[in-house]
Amino acid sequence: MPLVSPVALRVVCGAAVLGMVTVVTTGRGDERTVPAGCPAPVVVSHRGYGPPGTENTVGAFRAALAAGSRQVELDVHFTRDHRPVLMHDATVDRTTTGTGRVSGMTLSRFRALRTPGGERPATLGEAFRLLRASGGRTLLDLKEVPDAADLRSLAGEYHRTNAYRWASLMSFSLDALRAVRSIPARRGLLARTAPSVALARRFAFVGIRHDRLTEKLVRAYERAGVTVYAWTPNDPAAWRRLAGYGVERVVTDETPAYLAWATRLCGRQRLAARRTTNFGSLATTSQLPKSLRSFTW
């Protein structure tokens, strides 16, 4: 595995690159709580973090942030009155005390439900306000194609919280991604099998089932300027493999375990990385190691 992953490192520079690179950031706070220069991918907390029945709740997002994550993944459906709410399934049966399709409920009916832990199921607006206040980020998975009224409500939530830079839109549905093109946020294509590079290039990133990724695929996407996210690896063997491939982010259910693993990995790698990534004497990006020339400075 390379000492510094070609897509896991972000270099912060001003007028010139001075001295040792030791900072990892993306412009909206530190996205992970592991040492700079670490080859571990950024962690994204899948539907937040918590026991079964808490997914996609404000409590789950708070728990993920408290565990050290700076980014959560969440799932959006729309109510009958066109309000964006958080639910993975098309029905509320699995994660609430109620039954029925989200699309068949008004917002007030949806909010009257309770999770097994006693929480109200969340709206997108609640999640956005929490993330804005905490400096967090999110990947928003559209589970259905929004109609015109849905889109107006979704755009309104982005506008109210100025979420464009920290709330990326993604979906398995090309139709859904086309429908939200008017919202100026990053868009990503989700896929169970690797999409063609030609298709992937239409998006800022691709999110691919982790066991369908290979190093060759990741490098091909990287050469095309497409960032790769992997979902949903939950064990150290998978995390090691994906770090070796140069995957940018992992969407996992195991936030604390992942961060503990990443910290151990970085503890072993940090000294070696510092010995081999001193860019203080390099005047141009053409003098950087080949694996680092594609970064945005």
Image (spheres, rainbow, N blue to C red):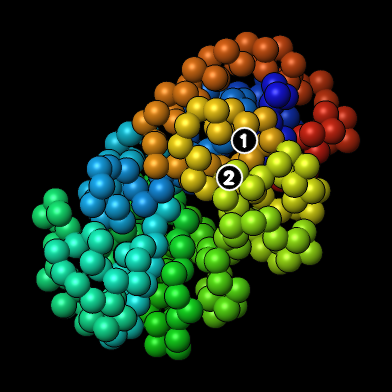
**Helix, strand or loop status at disc 2:** helix
- Expressed as whole percent of the image width and height from the top left, the position of residue 204 reads 65, 59
- Expressed as whole percent of the image width and height from the top left, the position of residue 96 reads 19, 62
Q: Are marks 2 and 1 in contact (CB under 8 Å)?
A: yes
Which residue appears farthest toward the bottom when viewing the image? 148
Q: Is residue 130 left or right of residue 139?
A: left
- Total numbered labels placed on residues in the image: 2
Q: Residues within 10 Å of mark 2 (few under 14, many from 20)?
A: many
Q: Amino acid at mark 1?
A: Leu
- Expressed as whole percent of the image width and height from the top left, the position of residue 274 reads 67, 15
- Expressed as whole percent of the image width and height from the top left, the position of residue 24 reads 57, 32
Please report the residue visible at 23 percent of the width from the left and 66 percent of the height from the top. 93
Q: Residues within 10 Å of mark 1 (few under 14, many from 20)?
A: many
Please report the residue visible at 31 percent of the width from the left and 56 percent of the height from the top. 56
Q: Amino acid at mark 2?
A: His
Question: How far apart in space, not on screen, are marks 2 and 1 (Cα)?
Answer: 8 Å
Q: Is residue 131 left or right of residue 216?
A: left
Please report the residue visible at 23 percent of the width from the left and 81 percent of the height from the top. 105
Is residue 161 visible in the rendered structure shown here? Answer: no
Disc on res. 210: 2
Disc on res. 242: 1
Q: Is residue 119 left or right of residue 150?
A: left
**Helix, strand or loop status at disc 1:** helix
Specify the quadrant that holds the C terminus.
Answer: top right
